[in-house]
Image (tube, rainbow, N blue to C red):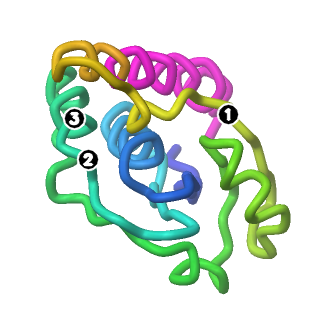
Amino acid sequence: MMGKRRRVLFLCTHNSARSQMAEGLLRHLGSDRFEVHSAGTQATHVRPLAIRATVELGVDISQQQSKSLDRYLGEPFDLVITVCDEANEACPVFPGAKERRHWSLLDPSKAVGTEAEQLAVYRAVRDAIRERIERELLSSDTG
C-alpha cells in the first residue's frame, strides 16, 4: 500500500552544493516515496562540481535551480533538514515543519587546490549525504 509521499526540504546557505546534492540523491534513491525540495537562505546557482559528483552516481542535478527559502515559508513539510551550520543558525524556526534535523556537513565550495582535489571533496560530501539519506530516511521510512 502506498502511503502519502513525505515532503522533505533541504536547506543550506546558498543552495548551490550540499542541499542540491541532497535533493537529487533523495529524489533518486527514495523514488516515489518522497517529494523533495531544496532552498537556501540566499539563492545562487548549482555548482558544476556538485553536478559532476552526483552524475558519477547516475544522478543528474544539472536541471535543478537554486531557490530562495522564502518560496517555501508558507508550505507544510514532514521534514526540514539543514545541511550547513550557517543555515541552521539563520533559520532557527521553520513554521511549516513537522520535524527538523540538522546534518553538519563540510562545505565543498570552500575546497581549494586543483579541480581534481576539489572534486574529491565534493565526492566525500556527496557520499556522506548519501549515507545519511540511506541510514536516516530510507531505512527508517516505514511509509
Residue at the image point whose x is 44% and y is 57% from the top: 15
Q: CA distance from mark 3 to mark 2?
A: 6 Å
Q: Is residue 134 above or below residue 30?
A: above
Residue 62 horizontal/vertical position (percent)? 15, 51
Of the two numbered discs 3 and 1 in the rendering, the one whose residue sits closer to the viewer: 3
Q: Is residue 98 above or below residue 51?
A: below
Of the two numbered discs 1 and 2 in the rendering, the one whose residue sits closer to the viewer: 2
Considering the whole magenta stretch, tell me its main secondary structure. helix
In contact (CB < 8 Å): disc 3 and disc 1: no
* Number of the label disc, if any, that sits on residue 49: 3
Closest to the observer, 27 or 68:
68
Residue at the image point whose x is 69% and y is 58% from the top: 78
Task: Report the number of numbered marks.
Answer: 3
Residue to which mark 1 is pinned: 103
Q: Is residue 107 above or below residue 127?
A: below
Q: Residue furthest front?
A: 113
Residue to which mark 2 is pinned: 47
Element class at badge 2:
loop
Boundaries of the magenta span: 122-143
Mark 2, Cα crowd under 10 Å, few <14 / some 14-19 / many 20+, is some
In contact (CB < 8 Å): disc 3 and disc 2: yes
Residue 67 in the magenta stretch? The answer is no
Residue 135 in the magenta stretch? The answer is yes
Mark 3, Cα crowd under 10 Å, few <14 / some 14-19 / many 20+, is many
Residue 56 horizontal/vertical position (percent)? 16, 21
Element class at badge 3:
helix
Left or right placement of residue 98 versus residue 55 in this view? right
Q: CA distance from mark 1 to mark 2?
A: 20 Å
Q: Hey, what amino acid is under mark 1?
A: Trp
Residue 115 horizontal/vertical position (percent)? 17, 23
Residue at the image point whose x is 34% and y is 24% from the top: 112
